[in-house]
């Protein structure tokens, strides 16, 4: 009777992991290795994993069968998760550009209600990250690997006003500047 109890416990742990993390399969490629007897085929998978609250990771995996490649890529993505600061939990703090190889991307913060305006692989990154409003453009390579890595390079450059203020030894209001002051004056009038 102890075995069924263990099975129930394992099922609930799997369900809990599934509800916390968002997994997006970006692409699967068939790759070949030429050997003495001919070609040996394998499958390569690219997976994005995020929690929808500002953490996201990229993983790639290669195996002879598709499910094994996806599992390897998912495990790699979970290990490589990183945090990205978000404004109001829905968009970026400022506009950024990223580059990886021939892939270049431009990411722009957007007002509430804009939605995710991005193509293919970049959309998967934003959905897993939990960004609801962003405008993104891919310039150059349309290779999913390069687009995703360029997107991650851009996201690494995003800094919150609080972190910039701490680095400079100033107050957040000093960093935000006249915009915050103008809004305060408008509210008083």
Image: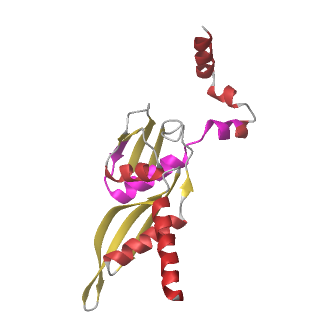
Q: Which SS type dominates the magenta stretch?
A: helix
In percent of the image, x 52 and y 76: which residue is there? 9
Residue 187, horizontal then vertical, whole percent: 59, 14
Q: In this view, does 142 lie above or below 69?
A: above
Residue 153, horizontal then vertical, whole percent: 49, 51
- Given residues 115 and 139, the one toward you in this image is 115
- Report whether residue 100 is seen: no
Q: In which quarter of the image is the C terminus?
A: top right
In the displayed structure, does residue 148 sit left or right of residue 13? left
In percent of the image, x 43 and y 70: which residue is there? 73
- Number of disc labels: 0
- Given residues 21 and 159, the one toward you in this image is 21
In percent of the image, x 60 and y 39: which residue is there? 160
In the displayed structure, does residue 162 sit left or right of residue 81? right
- Given residues 19 and 153, the one toward you in this image is 19
Q: Give the range drawn in magenta.
A: 137-165
Quadrant of the rendered image containing residue 60: bottom left
Residue 138, horizontal then vertical, whole percent: 35, 45
Residue 51, horizontal then vertical, whole percent: 50, 56
Most extreme residue toward the front is 1
Q: In this view, does 50 lie above or below 85?
A: below
User: Is residue 156 rendered magenta in the image?
Assistant: yes
- Given residues 122 and 140, the one toward you in this image is 122
Most extreme residue toward the right is 169
- Report whether residue 51 is seen: yes
Most extreme residue toward the bottom is 37
């Amino acid at each position: 009777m102890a075995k069924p109890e263990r099975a129930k416990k394992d099922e609930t742990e799997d369900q809990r992991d599934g509800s916390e993390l968002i997994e997006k399969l970006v692409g699967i490629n068939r790759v070949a290795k030429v050997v003495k007897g001919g070609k040996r085929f394998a499958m390569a998978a690219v997976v994005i994993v995020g929690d929808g609250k500002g953490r996201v990771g990229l993983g790639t995996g290669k195996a002879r069968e598709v499910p094994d490649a996806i599992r390897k890529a998912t495990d790699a993505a979970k290990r490589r998760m990183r945090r990205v600061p978000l404004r109001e939990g829905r968009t970026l703090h400022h506009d950024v550009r990223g580059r990886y190889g021939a892939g270049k991307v431009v990411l722009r913060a957007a007002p509430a209600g804009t939605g995710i305006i991005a193509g293919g692989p970049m959309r998967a990154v934003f959905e897993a990250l939990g960004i609801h409003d962003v405008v993104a453009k891919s310039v150059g390579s349309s290779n999913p690997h390069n687009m995703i890595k360029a997107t991650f390079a851009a996201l690494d450059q995003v800094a919150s006003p609080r972190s910039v203020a701490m680095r400079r030894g100033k107050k957040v209001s000093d960093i935000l500047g006249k915009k915050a002051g103008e809004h305060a004056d408008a509210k008083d009038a």
